Amino acid sequence: MSISAKDVMELKNQTGVGMMHCKKALTEAEGDLEKALDLLRQKGLAIASKKASREASEGLVSSYLHMGGKIGVLLEINCETDFVAKTDDFQGLIKDVAMHIAASNPLYVNREEISSEVIAKEKEIYASQVTNKPAEIVEKIVTGKLEKYYSDICLVDQVFVKDPDQKLKIKDLVVEKIAKLGENIVIKRFSRFQLGEKIS
Amino acid sequence: MSISAKDVMELKNQTGVGMMHCKKALTEAEGDLEKALDLLRQKGLAIASKKASREASEGLVSSYLHMGGKIGVLLEINCETDFVAKTDDFQGLIKDVAMHIAASNPLYVNREEISSEVIAKEKEIYASQVTNKPAEIVEKIVTGKLEKYYSDICLVDQVFVKDPDQKLKIKDLVVEKIAKLGENIVIKRFSRFQLGEKIS
């Protein structure tokens, strides 16, 4: 089958991946743009995991204010070079993530930040809700509920509020940028203040 | 002696206090503008302490980014009404304090946030540095050093970086605004991120 130049360009624009790779992915996907995107994302993921061990100490601190100062977010995202930090792609990422934090109110960047006591307690609660099931089923249910818990309160596990399909997680967003920009990218930390909220 | 209208206006602009009070203060200060300002500040202080017990749950969350995102500050300051939060005076205050935090890197809003263990340890160190002195002298020296410690790390005890005389503390800045705006104003919390710094 023939792949249209328009689709190749579209895919290139969406992913930032080179023309040849886009054409190859579209051929492999038999012209299906969404499938081709997935194929590239899988490759991007492969590239991303290789980069993920490299140190990221450059980047940006950015902020987002919502409703004229009723909610404020401060966010640090790291990359490897100041050059990448200055790209529109990186600046778009930090803007998107800051806006997402304002809207979705995560409590942690990732699950590694949650203390083992809190996780143990959650597990205990979930397990106590399941009765008369074999241990391996209980284990499965608890694991499932724990994943749900992470996706509620951990930034990288949350679904990106601006994703129209409500599938793309914040970590996917980061992986896409790693694949596109060719540098390791790490969400380091954030603060979110809501006017008048109680603080402990 | 006669007080010039120009001085009265100047004092009014600097303090936001009514014309009559300005004229009275200038007369009392025998035309000395700085002394008159001090007199008004003393009165402002009296007003401010009365207001300080009233609840402040309105206000603003604001941010400040330094050097294109190398340092970022998120700050919440509360007042009593949204009306005051929208005034140029209040917005100027939050902007000034956020900028100050970026420059001066305080660790706490005020001394009440420091744990008693940390303070006890500081006191111990200071006391151990003084030898062969009567207990009351040691106590005085320790208290003095502790004040110095607070003014190093507590936002409200720090000298405002933009004060040309390097005398005005952040808490004085707040008291001035309380006197001028007629509402209790409280610096609630801040975050300060410096790109690439180690976090614990």
Image (cartoon, coloured by chain):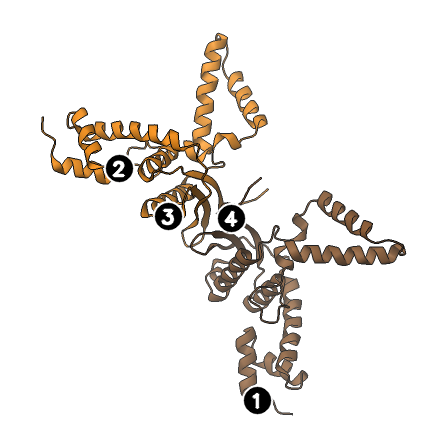
Chain colours: A brown, B orange
Mark 3, Cα crowd under 10 Å, few <14 / some 14-19 / many 20+, is few
Sequence-first tag of 2 and 3 = 2
Image quarter of the C terminus of chain B:
top right
Q: For mark 3, what is the residue? A: B83
For this rendering, which residue is in front, B107 or B57? B57
Q: Position of residue A133 (x, y in %)?
A: 89, 56
Type of the residue with mark 4: Phe
For this rendering, which residue is in front, B190 or A77? B190
Mark 1, Cα crowd under 10 Å, few <14 / some 14-19 / many 20+, is few
Q: Position of residue A189 (x, y in %)?
A: 56, 50
Q: For mark 4, what is the residue? A: A193
State how many labels appear.
Answer: 4
Type of the residue with mark 2: Thr
For the question of whether residue B116 can be seen, the reply is: yes
Q: Nearer the viewer, mark 4 or mark 3?
A: 3
Determine whether the residue tagged by mark 3 lies in a helix, strand or loop. helix
Mark 4, Cα crowd under 10 Å, few <14 / some 14-19 / many 20+, is many
Determine whether the residue tagged by mark 1 lies in a helix, strand or loop. loop
Q: Position of residue B43 (x, y in %)?
A: 29, 28
Residue pictured at 51% horizontal, 20% vertical? B126
Type of the residue with mark 1: Ser
